[in-house]
Image (cartoon, rainbow, N blue to C red):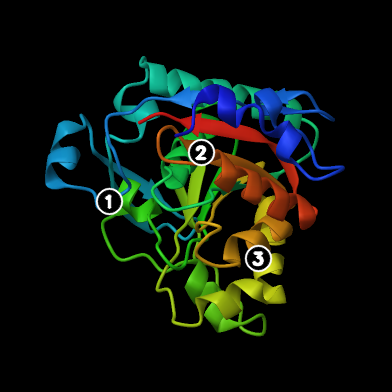
Amino acid sequence: MTTVAQVDRLSAATTAGAPSVEGGRDGAHGVDVAAIARAGATSEGDLSDHEAAALAGTAAQGGDEAGDSFDYIYSRRIACLSDPAGAAAASYRSLQTHLLAGHVRDGRRGLALCASQRETGCTTVAVNLAVAFAQAGINTLLVDANLHRPAVHDFIRPSSAAAGLADMLASGSDRRIDEVRRQVRPNLSILYAGGAPARARDLIANRWFKQIIDDCMRSYEFTIVDTPALGDSTDARHIAMSVRYGLIVARRDVTLVADVRHAVEALSGDRVRLVGSFLADF
């Protein structure tokens, strides 16, 4: 099983010219993004009634530019909200600080979070990182681009069914619609996955997806994109190529070093710039 040291010694496994993720450091920009997150939940399943009740102040209201307001319920797996003084929240804030200093401040406005397999905690990291950026005053957009197994709505659940990325993709570039839920929290907007159609893979691979992502990165200071597992389909690679920058997420005692090595090689081969790795421990 994977340990911190094993994940952070992956530089020897990267292809020639690929950025080293040893110690989670991007050799070109000095972004140290290796961290350990400890949280109470063990998987990315549905939000339970117990979770909703256990989080103080679970219900919050957000609104969009049209004046419509929505209620949201927050999972206690969002450590930055449920336990802001805890170790998990501190590690997400540390990751946010490093990315802000060495990635966002350099004008890089997007990041795709990628994992080699399911049950790695990629969505957990994506949601917590987005909340941490929003809490730091950065106008942040969280995109659920996992049209196969969307999970962002399990962490921040809207009071009504949310259309999203799939609906925008299905509408086509000739009939643009905007399904971003704005100001879900201060400085945090969300583009949910929406009603994922059977042809999700074809939608992700088309040019319209890249245009949507480009528009998002122009409109927000930082866009975080949650992706499906690399082992499930080629979608994660298409998404990362559109965003151009990626972060590898691994999970202690779940992710194998060989799987992370394969993810690094695949994304580097697609000319995705990897800023580092994040090892989750929950």
The residue singled out by tag 3 in the image is 212
Amino acid type assigned to the residue bearing label 2 in the image: Ala
Quadrant containing the C terminus is top left
Q: Is residue 124 above or below residue 2?
A: below
Q: Report the side of 58 relative to 267 (left or right).
A: left
Disc number at residue 250?
Answer: 2
Mark 1 vs 3, N-terminal side = 1
Q: CA distance from mark 2 to mark 3?
A: 27 Å
Residue 248, percent from left and from top: 60, 41
Residue under the point 40% across and 52% down: 152
Q: In terms of secondary structure, where does tag 1 sit?
A: loop
Residue under the point 61% across and 34% down: 277
The residue singled out by tag 1 in the image is 45
Q: In terms of secondary structure, where does tag 3 sit?
A: helix
Determine crowd level at label 1: few under 14, some 14-19, many 20+ residues with C-alpha closer than 10 A.
few
Q: Is residue 46 above or below residue 34?
A: below
Q: Quadrant of residue 12?
A: top right
Residue 120, percent from left and from top: 43, 44
Q: In terms of secondary structure, where does tag 2 sit?
A: strand
Amino acid type assigned to the residue bearing label 1 in the image: Gly
